[in-house]
Amino acid sequence: MLEWLEAHQLSCWIKSVIGIECPGCGMQRAVLLLIKGEFLASFRIYPGLFPLLLFFILAVLKICGMKKIQPGLLKIMGFVCLAIILISYLLKLTIVIN
């Protein structure tokens, strides 16, 4: 099944139209590496994946009725995810340009 997923990854339409990677480029490869157990390689490709997974886990737990998860925590985690994704994207762009 993993081989099938690797062979059928979606292409980024932003990269095909504009020619520049979008902030989400690399997420599919990072998820596949994470499934394979290659955590460091997954982090190198897409650093925002781990906080994003934590955010989704907390959101699902909150939706399922876990009262201990405060809405403020979800907001903070959302902003942390956004910041990590944007910072890593800007660093990726500057490395590609230079």
Image: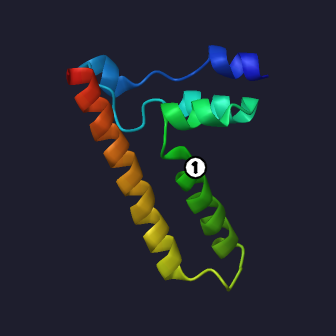
Residue that label 1 marks: 50
Task: Indicate the position of residue 68 as horizontal and vertical percent values.
Answer: 67, 85
Q: Is residue 73 above or below residue 34?
A: below
The image shows residue 71, relative to residue 27, as above or below, that is below
Q: Is residue 57 left or right of residue 98?
A: right
Q: Label 1: few (<14), some or many (≥20) within 10 Å?
A: some
Residue at 54% x, 45% y: name it. Answer: 49
| Residue furthest out toward the bottom | 67
Query: Based on the displayed image, in which of its 4 quarters is residue 51 positioned?
Result: bottom right
| Picture layout, residue 54 above or below residue 41 | below
- 6 vs 89, nearest the viewer: 89
Q: Quadrant of residue 16?
A: top left
Residue 56: % across, % down? 60, 59
Q: Residue at x 36, y 55 (%)?
A: 83
Measuring 50% from the left and 31% from the top, which residue is drawn there? 45
- Work out which residue is located at the far right of the displayed protein and give it: 1
Q: Nearer the viewer, residue 70 or 87?
A: 87
Q: Quadrant of residue 28?
A: top right
For the point 47% across and 80% down, which residue is it?
Answer: 72
Callout 1 amino acid: Phe
Q: Residue furthest left?
A: 98
